[in-house]
């Protein structure tokens, strides 16, 4: 299990991106978006993206995902977080085009599953766990407060 925080503003700082065999935890999601990729080699690779970042920093994070994938096929992408809060005009990624912008770097035909946590709570933690094989082989849960958890089912997601 690894934990990915939003990291710094420096474009060269990529500690917000990581890879694990079983689980990625994203704490402190209050204006952020998490991006988790299911790889064909049974691993997960993800990024914790902050809305105040430059387009260069976001591109750097997505390209780092490709590097960490080491040529393994990306089967699908889960985008979960405070999507409705991404309204900054300087960012090319906005609430309505996450799937398009993600596919532009990670692959044009990727299945992208989207869930907006805006309105669930002010701050959430998101956990992505690898379960089984195939394109929907991740189990995502959203936690907030001391004891509140929402386990997301495939039908909770919008297909991007």
Image: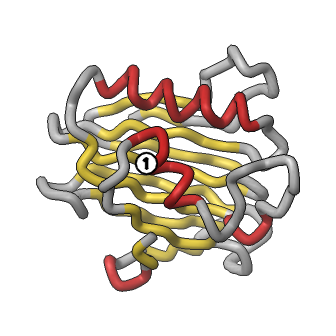
**Residue at the spot 47% in from the left edge and 54% down from the top edge:** 127
Residue 145 in view here:
no
Pinpoint residue 126: horizontal percent, then vertical percent: 54, 57
Most extreme residue toward the top, as rendered?
A: 12
Q: Is residue 35 above or below residue 154?
A: above
Left or right: 29 in relation to 71: right
The residue sitting at 42% across, 58% down in the picture is: 78
For label 1, the SS is strand
Residue in the foreground of this view, choosing between 53 and 44: 53
Classify 10 Å Cα crowding around label 1: few (below 14), some (14-19), many (20 and above): many
Q: Please indicate whether residue 138 sits to the left or right of residue 60 in the image.
A: left
Residue visible at 26% across and 50% down?
130
**Mark 1 — residue?**
36
Which image quadrant is residue 158 in?
bottom left
- Residue 110 visible: yes
| Residue 74 lies in quadrant | top left
Above or below, comparing residue 84 to residue 40 in the picture: below
Residue furthest right in the image: 89
**Percent position of residue 112, x then y:** 39, 62
The quadrant in which the N terminus is found is: top left
Q: Is residue 127 left or right of residue 15?
A: left
Q: Residue furthest left?
A: 133
Q: At which x and y percent is residue 63?
A: 50, 28
Q: At which x and y percent is residue 122? A: 79, 68
Judge by depth and name the residue closer to the eye, 1 or 8: 8
Outermost residue toward the bottom in this view: 155
């Amino acid at each position: 299990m690894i934990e990915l925080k939003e990291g710094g503003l420096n474009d060269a700082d990529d500690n917000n991106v990581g890879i694990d065999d079983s689980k990625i935890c994203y704490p402190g999601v209050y204006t952020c978006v998490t991006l988790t990729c299911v790889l064909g080699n049974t691993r997960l690779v993800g990024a914790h993206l902050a809305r105040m970042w430059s387009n260069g920093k976001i591109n750097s994070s997505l390209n780092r995902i490709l590097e960490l994938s080491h040529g393994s096929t990306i089967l699908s992408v889960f985008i979960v977080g405070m999507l409705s809060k991404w309204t900054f005009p300087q960012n090319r990624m906005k609430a309505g085009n996450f799937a398009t912008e993600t596919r532009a770097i990670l692959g044009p035909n990727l299945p992208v599953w989207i869930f907006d946590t805006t309105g669930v709570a002010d701050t959430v933690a998101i956990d992505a766990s690898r379960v089984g094989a195939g394109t929907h082989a991740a189990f995502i849960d959203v936690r907030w407060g001391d004891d509140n958890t929402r386990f997301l089912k495939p039908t909770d997601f919008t297909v991007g």
